Image (spheres, rainbow, N blue to C red):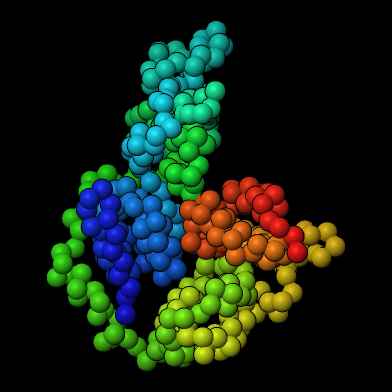
Amino acid sequence: MSEIIRYMSGGTEVVLSKDIIKRYLTSDETVTDEEIFMFMKLAEAQGLNPFTRQIYLVKYKGRPASFVVGKEVFTSRAAQHPAYRGFEAGVIVQTAKGELINREGALTLKGEVLVGGWAKVFREPYKVPVTSAVSIEEYGRDTPIWRSMRSVMIRKVAMVSALREAFPDSFAGLYDASEMGITQDLPEEPIEPPTKGEVHEEQYIGQIDRAPEEQPPIEVQPGLSREQADEIWRVLKGNTELASEFCRRTGKKIEEINPKAYKKALKLAQELALSAYGQEDQEAPQNAASGEPDALDETPQEGFISPIQYDIIFEAIKSKGNRKELQDSVLQLFNIRHLAALNATDFDTAMNYVDDTGIPF
């Protein structure tokens, strides 16, 4: 059965399922069930409506999916924060004489070279504003909107960056398309959501025409403990592709496996990990003396942390006396549902947080 989630966003009920997302919100056939599940949970946790283009699922063949939001989400959410005291933003230009100027707004004069964007966000109780400066060379894209509105776009990137730093609790884990390297202009026109009748039909998709080879080999009902689910994730080393294959074979998400089928599920996870890494899962693919990845390490995937990074942070949390509270705190800090969804750029920050916050045994 295709899981359906319902939540409120700006006074409107949003209804999502795997089939609804595939039908209305993405056209890429390579998107995995695990990526769809993570997208649904992120949208639900943040109260964002994908039908009004507050959040997008962007998938390129051969790459992990990216979840990005529009600038309006940042500015409107910041305006509602009680500590918000406004912002300033503009462009960085170089004059014909070689002088760099931080100009407010998005005006670039003839003869000037657009270098980047800047922003300042004011919030209480900070005595100085949170500032950000970004380079057009790093963030500029060869898309129609960037070619026609380069000043406006780079100013927006700087604003988003400053707002996230100023309000990490509100924006951790949320990224603009330019920050995630999206090379296409995302549509802004709202989508007409499915009717109640169509949503009702979604509950039955997948039960009637499922092929025999897709029948789950494990009898499952909700119920794995957190420790059991985490152990399966550890064996899979946070690899979302392996997790997707695991879910396809069992017919359920990891957390929904029947506790009575835990050993079978763990064995399946070990078989998948062995086929992917060519070694037993208990033996992490790194040099134990140096802590550096060895020849068996997998190249980190763009976007999410790599399997070896997942293993490192998992073991770091596991070694602390407040393991459950610490893991919950990390997930909440980065607005993610599971460690595997941690962005690679946040890995060092997360590790420092674990080291500083965890209580050693």
Query: Would you say 353 lies left or right of 288 here?
Result: left
The residue under the point 64% across, 64% down is 323
Query: Would you say 103 lies left or right of 339 here?
Result: left
* Above or below: residue 271 compared with residue 129: below
* Above or below: residue 28 compared with residue 206: above
Image coordinates for residue 73, horizontal then vertical, percent: 35, 41
Query: Would you say 17 lies left or right of 253 here?
Result: left
Quarter of image, res 71: top left
Image coordinates for residue 276, horizontal then vertical, percent: 62, 75
* Above or below: residue 355 compared with residue 232: above
Quarter of image, res 228: bottom right
Residue lying at the far top of the rendered structure: 97
The residue under the point 55% across, 11% down is 99
Instruction: Let me know if residue 56 appears in the view.
Output: no
* Above or below: residue 13 compared with residue 130: below
35 or 259, nearer to the observer: 259
Which image quarter holds the C terminus? bottom right
Which image quarter holds the N terminus? bottom left
Image coordinates for residue 219, horizontal then vertical, percent: 44, 90
217 or 225, nearer to the observer: 225
The residue under the point 52% across, 36% down is 165
Image coordinates for residue 231, horizontal then vertical, percent: 61, 75
Instruction: Let me know if residue 128 appears in the view.
Output: yes
The residue under the point 42% across, 85% down is 221
Residue lying at the far right of the rendered structure: 289
